[in-house]
Image (cartoon, rainbow, N blue to C red):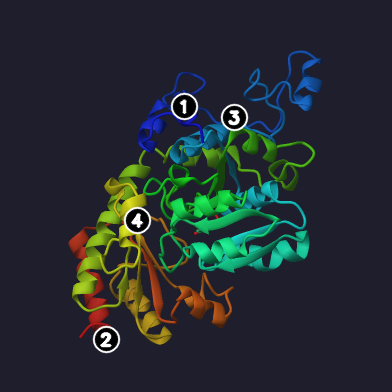
Amino acid sequence: MDDRLRGPSDPVERLAALRHEFGEHGGVNMSIEASTTFTVMEAGTMPEIFQGTLGPDAGGCYLYGRHFNPTVYVLGRQLAALEGTEAGYCTASGLGAIACALLGLLDQGDHIVASDTLYGGTWAMLSEFLPRKCGITTSFVDINDAKAVAAACGPRTRVVYAESLSNPTLRVTNLPMLAEVAHAHKAQLVVDNTFTPLGVTPTDHGADVVVHSLTKFVNGASDFIAGAVCGREEFIGSLMDLHVGPLMLLGPTMDPQVAHSISLRIPHLPIRMIEHARRAQVFAQRLEQAGVKVSYPGLESHPDHQLLQKIGRPEYGFGGLLTIDAGERAKAEALMDDLQNAEGFGFMAVSLGYFDTLMSCSASSTSSELSDEALAAAGIAPGLVRMSIGFTGSLEQRWQQLERALRRVGVIA
Ligand SMILES: *Cc1c(COP(=O)(O)O)cnc(C)c1O
């Protein structure tokens, strides 16, 4: 990607360099553009909007709420600044963003090479929905095995797909290697960066398109389902094409009120990510010392510790997620029960990136779309508890709660 168009190399500096959007009456916060349709001043303008000679970036003309909306576009620009892309636009969900990014890049008969450890919904979309409904097939491989990725690429491979940090196995994707292999096969690298906003910037390592579930860390309050696609201006524009654009025609439109709320939380995303990671690092180290089977990329014992050190931004640490293997499903469930109902440490809930800690047993919840063989191949043990570490309460108070619960259910002696 052209560095001149991306501005400063630091995402926080790119965000600060964006034009500040004031409210209609000079308010420090922007107004919400709540209209679904937009007036033109002269009848002749309408055909020009439909022909694409006028638009949001050409004459400031908007058309209809399912097409570009000014408030949603502001959040899209914030996401683009975050990810270092020329453009970005938002969707009603993360899966909406993923589906539209892929349908924008692929035609019937095309092929994807994807990681064998993916978010369950994405896995179902690639393994079942896309082949059946669209004739788009996927080969799932160990995504850090360069030879396996190259071997899976064929003449119709247009996309290589991975998550920056895999869910729930917390394996780090070797993005520089993957970009090289993808580009050698004339495929585009699409990366889901939901787990590591700011910590990893996939475009710094050659990714072409970045997708997000904004539902998680970016929003941070677990009150909106939302997503985003970031990429080159031409690509984002093509998603809104009136004839073949998936964002325009499938209609996963983000509501401007949602865009407004989320955009007000972007300025404190860096502070939140630092605190999620700081606490996760302390807990992971203490858990490891206590003999618990813990996985966290910030631990030297983690197989991808050095890789994340190399491709990540050190000031954001190693992310807000860790997993504990309680050994068996019953023990995992007892632990979560105790942590929620006796200790008040966090909540048993899927999702992540909330200000409080969220816990789920991956094999029987968010990864239950996977078959038993696929679960085993991906290394998702039945007693694996995924924790998205929150930042409410004090760190010591939370650690004491966690330690007491682990003792009570017998995970530590
Ligand atoms: C949650 C999640 C999604 C799906 O996002 P929604 O906003 O729920 O549609 C996709 N990828 C990852 C990594 C996720 O965690």
Distance Cα–Cα, label 1 vs label 2: 56 Å
Which quadrant does the C terminus fall into?
Answer: bottom left
Q: Amino acid at mark 4?
A: Leu
Mark number displayed over residue 4: 1
Task: Say whether disc 2 or disc 3 marks the residue closer to the N-terminus.
Answer: 3
**Judging from the image, what secondary structure is the residue with disc 1 in?**
helix
Marks 2 and 4 in Cβ contact (< 8 Å): no
Q: Report whether residue 319 is seen.
A: no
Marks 2 and 3 in Cβ contact (< 8 Å): no
Mark 3 Cβ and ligand 1 under 8 Å apart:
no
Disc 1 or disc 2, which is closer to the eye? 1
Disc 2 or disc 4, which is closer to the eye? 4
Marks 1 and 2 in Cβ contact (< 8 Å): no
The residue carrying pointer 3 sits among few (fewer than 14), some (14 to 19) or many (20 or more) residues within 10 Å by Cα, namely many
In the rendered image, residue 378, in percent from the top left (x then y), is placed at 49, 74
Mark 1 Cβ and ligand 1 under 8 Å apart:
no
The foreground one among 71 and 307 is 307
Q: Amino acid at mark 3?
A: Pro
The residue carrying pointer 1 sits among few (fewer than 14), some (14 to 19) or many (20 or more) residues within 10 Å by Cα, namely few
The residue carrying pointer 2 sits among few (fewer than 14), some (14 to 19) or many (20 or more) residues within 10 Å by Cα, namely few
Q: Amino acid at mark 2?
A: Gly
**Judging from the image, what secondary structure is the residue with disc 4 in?**
helix
Mark number displayed over residue 410: 2
Q: Which residue is mark 3?
A: 70
Task: Say whether disc 1 or disc 4 marks the residue closer to the N-terminus.
Answer: 1
**Judging from the image, what secondary structure is the residue with disc 2 in?**
loop
Residue 305, quarter of the rendered image? bottom left
Q: Amino acid at mark 1?
A: Arg
Mark number displayed over residue 359: none
Mark number displayed over residue 308: 4
Mark 2 Cβ and ligand 1 under 8 Å apart:
no
